[in-house]
Every structure is written in C-alpha cells, then in structure tokens.
Image: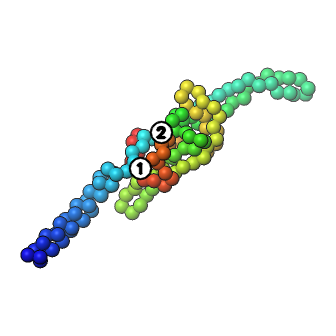
Amino acid sequence: MRKRILWVLTGCFFLLMLFGTFFHDEVDGLFREQVRAAVPQKETVQTAVTVMIGGEEVPAEMTKEFLTVPVSAVKDGRVYVIEQVEVPGGSYFVVRLREVETDGEREGRIRITCGLSEGEEIAEVFTDTLSDGMRVRSIR
C-alpha cells in the first residue's frame, strides 16, 4: 500500500513539473504585479527673453524641450522605468527606480528636464507595492 501511494505521489510530482514546463509563462504572469505603461511625450515651450547685444536690449525667443509624464507616475522626483530583460528562452519586464529632475506641472502632466530619454516606458502610477528590480506584467 505504501509503495502504491509513493508511486502516485511521484507521478503527480512529475506531471506538475511537465505542466510547469509548458505553461510557466502563464502561471508566472498570474503572480506578477500588473503595471500600465506610459510613454513620455515631448513638449516644446517657447519663451520671450531679452538679450543684451552691444549694450542694447534685443527681444528674442528661447526654445526649451521637455518630456512630460502623468503626475501619478512621479513621486519625490522618482519614476519607475519599465525595462525588458532578455533571458535564454524568452524575456520579462522589470521596473527600475530612477531619479528625475522636474520643472513644474501643467494640465495633469509633469515636465521632466533630466533623467528620462525619449521612447522609454514608465509605470503610469507610482505605487508603494513596486520595488526596484521587481518583475512586472506590462500593459500598454
């Protein structure tokens, strides 16, 4: 009787291992934190300035370019950047905590002057449940 129970348990173990081999991405994805990805948008601002040339004031325009992100994505000058990590047999997403410099808020978006590059994805909402290097499921 004991041998039969041992064989059944061993068979169940190997079936679970086989199941996990084929469905590990789906099962693993169920337990990852889900984050919505946001792409920083480029904003150009022109401001009128006065420049001194030869002792004379001359009006001019100065152009600044910013990346803007949702207000909910920034907390204490930090954002979570979503990175894709390649591993043998696949890839997964992780979040990396990054310091950014901000320059005010306008229409629900914060201007980023330094710390982000165009095309990088960030977590749309900064939550305390995320941590640096944590595997996540990215929703676009």
Q: Residue at x 73, y 23 (%)?
A: 48
- Most extreme residue toward the bottom, as rendered? 3
Q: x%, y% of residue 18?
A: 22, 64
Question: Going by the image, does 69 lie left or right of 3?
Answer: right
Indicate whether 133 appears above or below 88.
above
31 or 55, which lies in front? 31
Badge 1 crowding class, 10 Å Cα cut-off, few under 14, some 14 to 19, many 20 or more, is many
Q: Residue at x 21, y 67 (%)?
A: 13
- Inter-mark Cα distance, 2 to 1: 13 Å
**Quarter-of-image position of residue 51:** top right
Q: Which residue is mark 1?
A: 136
Residue 42 can be seen in this image = no
Q: x%, y% of residue 110?
A: 58, 33
Question: Going by the image, does 34 lie left or right of 132?
Answer: left
Q: Are the residues flagged by discs 2 and 1 in contact, CB closer than 8 Å?
A: no
Residue 17 can be seen in this image = yes
Q: Residue at x 55, y 25 (%)?
A: 107
Q: x%, y% of residue 99?
A: 60, 46
Question: For numbered disc 2, what is the local secondary structure?
Answer: loop
Looking at the rendered structure, the kind of residue marked 1 is: Val
Q: Residue at x 30, y 58 (%)?
A: 24
Q: x%, y% of residue 103?
A: 65, 34
Q: Which residue is mark 2?
A: 125
Indicate whether 92 appears above or below 8.
above
Looking at the rendered structure, the kind of residue marked 2 is: Val
Q: Which mark is residue 82?
A: none
Badge 2 crowding class, 10 Å Cα cut-off, few under 14, some 14 to 19, many 20 or more, is some
Question: For numbered disc 1, what is the local secondary structure?
Answer: strand
Q: Earlier in the sequence, mark 2 or mark 1?
A: 2
Question: Going by the image, does 118 lie left or right of 23?
Answer: right
